[in-house]
Amino acid sequence: MKGAGRFPAPGDVRTAVLELLAERHDGVTPQEMAGLLAAAFGRPRRWARSAVNALVAEGELAYQEQHGHTILTPSFDRPVRLSPRVIVAPPEIPCTPGPGTVVLRLAHGASFGTGQHPTTRLSVRGIDAALGEMALVDLGPESTVLDIGTGSGILAAAALLLGVGRGIGTDIDPCALDEARRNAALNRLAACLSIRAAPIEEIQGRFALITANLRYPTLRRILPAMRRLSASRGAWVVSGIRSEEMGPLRAEYAACGLECRWQAEEKDWAALVVAQPPAA
């Protein structure tokens, strides 16, 4: 942080705020943020309050209700990079991606999966790693993805935009089903992404990529179904687990012959990419 003898540049304030939000697992209220900024930059609290208000007005920050309190979060009313190759953006905001980058258009709704929660960001990073640098899936028109508990459809859409040919997203929430279909159409994926109100036990076929951003007990319960639906050469991207649950889940997957190929953590949440061990 800069010392008290110099008025910080706007970019410094933005970076400081985002770092503070990343460090705090329980959220930061506007009042708390003003106090933290004032202390960090050696400026009056009224300056800090003005700096926070300016970042909200510029669309860098947004207010969110959490347990009866208002907290600050990074704003998703603008393009936000979730992984090296995936940017999520609202439908109406112009965004020109660089080479090798895709833009996933996502309409705001009530369903889970907007990129604001760490598990969504971790899942997209895992998908990017599995399909990109690790090349765990043979991409092309015949490759398939199954997204269990699809919510907004963000994970299935990311996989398709990164090169998977066809996909299925399942959910039991009617609101999620409607939003996932609208987001599929928004990204011109309606023809290759089927959104179904079906439990995993009713899904048939083999999938090169399976994604599931679900809580640990659910991931354990559906493990037999995931094994049944998994292609012999493919990968799973799972999140929704707490950091302390990562070890036990890895052990369960290892018992099934699956190897952890990637893992990451953010704010006490974790994600894994598992696959069959590489051929000797």
Image (tube, helix red, strand yellow):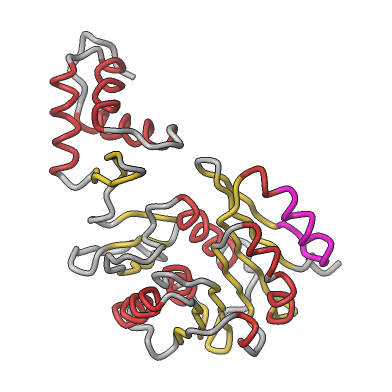
Q: Is residue 134 above or below residue 181?
A: above
- Quadrant (top left/top right/bottom left/bottom right) for the C terminus: bottom right
- The residue at the point 24 percent across, 25 percent down is 34
Looking at the picture, tell me which residue is in the foreground, 136 or 70.
70
Which residue is drawn at the image coordinates 61% and 80% (left, top)?
200
Asked whether residue 266 is drawn in magenta, I would say no
Quarter of the image holding residue 79? bottom left
Q: Residue furthest front?
A: 68
Q: Nearer the viewer, residue 124 or 5?
A: 124
Q: How many marks?
A: 0
Quarter holding the N terminus is: top left
* Residue depicted at x 36% and y 43%: 67
Q: Position of residue 197 (x, y in %)?
A: 48, 84
Residue 141 spot, x, y in % from top left: 53, 88
Magenta span: chief secondary structure = helix
Quick check: is 259 in the magenta stretch? yes
What span is in magenta?
247-260
Above or below, 49 against 133 in this view is above
Q: Residue at image x 67%, y 85%?
A: 206
Q: Residue furthest top?
A: 5
Q: Is residue 155 above or below residue 264?
A: below
Q: Percent x, y for residue 274?
A: 69, 62
Q: Position of residue 4 (x, y in %)?
A: 24, 10
- Quadrant for residue 100, please give it: bottom left
In which image quadrant can residue 174 be found? bottom left
Q: Is residue 269 left or right of residue 261?
A: left
Report whether 69 appears left or right of 100: left
Residue in the foreground of this view, choosing between 180 and 131? 180
